[in-house]
Amino acid sequence: MSIENISPTLFSMGSGGLIGFLVGFAVKRVFKILAVIAGVFFGSLMYLQSQNLISVNWDRLQEMSQWTVTTLAHSLTDVGQISTISGNLGIPLTGGLAAGFAFGVMKG
């Protein structure tokens, strides 16, 4: 086997890994920012309710958040889409993307 035969595969894995790392790093940073915003929002709601300035229906808020999380989880874990993406992009690129994404999330 010569380097000319292996180089397209290595390029696919390397570029997929780099793109996956950048996406994973950015996703983790965005989720951290969203978590801080959500924490400040809910903390503000609790404070305003403790001061009797507003009244919050916590049961309804919990129902809405559970529905949102369930819908998001179902859309992110659709295995049919994942197998279609890996079939269209190829195993080396998909593997590089997955490994890069995992590394980016760990380092982000």
Image (cartoon, rainbow, N blue to C red):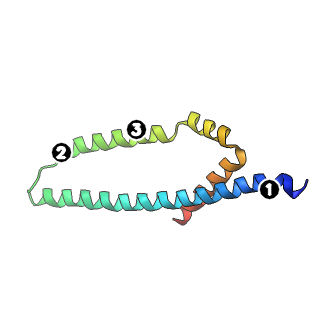
Give the Cα separation between the discs numbered 1 and 3. Answer: 41 Å
- Give SS at disc 1: helix
Callout 3, which amino acid? Answer: Thr
Circle 1 or circle 3, nearest the eye: 1
Q: What residue sits 71% from the left and 54% below the top?
A: 13
Q: Pointer 3: what residue?
A: 71
Residue 57, disc: 2
Q: Nearer the viewer, residue 14 or 69?
A: 14
Callout 2, which amino acid? Answer: Asn
Residue 68 x, y percent position in the rendering = 35, 41
- Give SS at disc 3: helix
Q: Quadrant of residue 46?
A: bottom left
Residue 70, disc: none
Nearer the N terminus, badge 2 or badge 1? 1
Question: Is 75 above or below relative to 1?
Answer: above
Taking the view exactly as shown, the residue that stands out farthest to the top is 80
- Give SS at disc 2: loop
Graded by Cα atoms within 10 Å as few (under 14), some (14 to 19) or many (20 or more), the crowding at tag 2 reads: few
Callout 1, which amino acid? Answer: Ser
Q: What residue sits 42% from the left and 57% below the top?
A: 31
Q: Pointer 1: what residue?
A: 7
User: Are the residues tagged 1 and 3 within 8 Å (C-beta)?
Assistant: no
